Each structure stands twice: as structure tokens, then as C-alpha cells.
Amino acid sequence: MQITVFGATGTFGRQLAPQLRERGHTVIAAHRSNGVDTVTGQGVAEAAEGSDVLVDCVNQLTINADKAIDFFSRSSRSIAEAAARQPGTSVAVLSIAFRPETAESRLMGYYQGKAMQERIFRRLIPDEQLLMFRSAQWFELVDTMTIKAGPLRFVPKMRVQALAVAEAARMMAEAIDARETGTIEVAGPEISDFAEIARRLTTARAEKAGTKPPKIVGIPLPGPMARDGLIPPSPRMSDVTVDEWLRSV
């Protein structure tokens, strides 16, 4: 198959594209640096032309609900419209595992944007042509969500069933290769929180460097993120644990 990956140079896209190529597919890497902007729509139709599957793994991390909703609304619509111009073209969407109550939290506008993304694709793409791939949080996001202050590291105590981004990409590539549709949720083998993952990550790094690890301060978050709001109820699971991932990075 010919597959266009939008967001091919992002954290997930650069893992997914080679996974698809290894399975014998022709991959068109679409991203802003080669003239494709899904928010404005520039170059989207051209990048999609002739492809059997369009993959949306475009992302913008923000806690501002207005920014998240605007970004995902524009980006999702331009990809969905490109698919609609080519009857029979399927769409695979990288989304995030969360329960409905999480998208209602004022603290996490990002999830409101992702909820909007899902609604747009479900409205514009026929069910038999749509794969909604909902991944739990990735180990790699810990660094992004860590705030450094001298010897301290402040990390949100978000209850997660995290997995390695490479594992999520492998599982999505397998689903695309098999032409699966519907909703698939994936997660790691352990339920933990970002603060605990950060402790294990900083300890492993300090051991390698022969230094003392920084002190991790977990910041409790109220509402669904402190409970099971980010835990998928019945996911396909990676068997790569945090410790196994740490040995590979």
C-alpha cells in the first residue's frame, strides 16, 4: 500500500514511518518542513494523492483548551477532506487513551482538543474506513512534563499505564498493515504515575553517569487524572516494562 503519514517527523511519526516501510509499504512522509501544513491545509491534498491510507499523527502539546481545539479542528478537517476526495481511501488516527470525564477537566485542555479530533473524523470518515488508534501515555513524555528547579524536578502525579513510543508505533503499524478499522486502545504492562517513572528514569541516568540523582517531587493533580481517567479499560498491551525500556535508552 501507499501510505501518507502526516506528522512524519514528530515523536510518533518518525517511529511509525520506518515500521510501515519494514512491512513493505511505500510511505509518503508529510510534514511542515517539506511544505505540508495540515492546519492551513497547504500541501495536504497533494501529499494524500494516490495513497491507500492517510495517517494523522500531527500533534501540538498545549494545556490551553482554545488552542488545542482550534489546532485539532483545523488539522483533522484538512486530512479528512483530503481523504474524502479519494473514495476508498482509509484514515488511521493517532489519538490518546482517556475516559470522557478527562476531556471535561479544565486543567487539561489538550484532551478537549483530542476529543474534538475524534469527533471530526468520526463524522467525516465512514466507519469502515476509519481506524482510531488510542495510545496510553508514553514513557518519553516524562521529560517533556518535568519542570527543573535546581536540584529538584517537579513532575505531575498522573496515574498512567504508559508504554514506549516505539511499542505504540509498532502496534499501530501492525493494525494499519492488517487494514483494521474501529477503535483500538494500547497501553503498557504496568499502572504507575509519571512521578514514579521519573524517579526510575533519573536514577538510571545517574547510575550511568556516576552522579547523584535529582530529587523528584510529585505534584498531585485533582480529578480524573488522579484516578483512572487516563487508564484504558481493556487495551492491547505491550510487554515492555519501564525498566526494560530504560535499559534501551
Image (spheres, grey):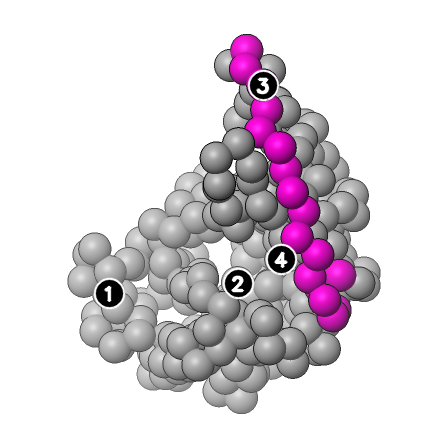
Magenta residues, start to end: 210-226
State the separation of the CA atoms marked 4 and 1. Answer: 25 Å
Q: Which of marks 1 and 2 is nearer the N terminus?
A: 1
154 vs 123, nearest the viewer: 154
Mark 3, residue position:
212
Q: Distance between the residues labelled 2 and 3?
A: 38 Å
Q: Is mark 2 on a helix, strand or loop?
A: strand
N-terminal-most mark, 3 or 4: 4
Mark 3 crowd level (few <14, some 14–19, many ≥20, 10 Å Cα)? few
Q: Are marks 4 and 2 in contact (CB under 8 Å)?
A: yes
* Residue type of the residue flagged with mark 3: Lys
Q: Residues within 10 Å of mark 4 (few under 14, many from 20)?
A: many
Q: Which of marks 4 and 2 is nearer the N terminus?
A: 2
Identify the disc placed on residue 135.
Answer: 4
Q: Which of marks 2 and 3 is nearer the N terminus?
A: 2
Q: Which mark is residue 36?
A: 1
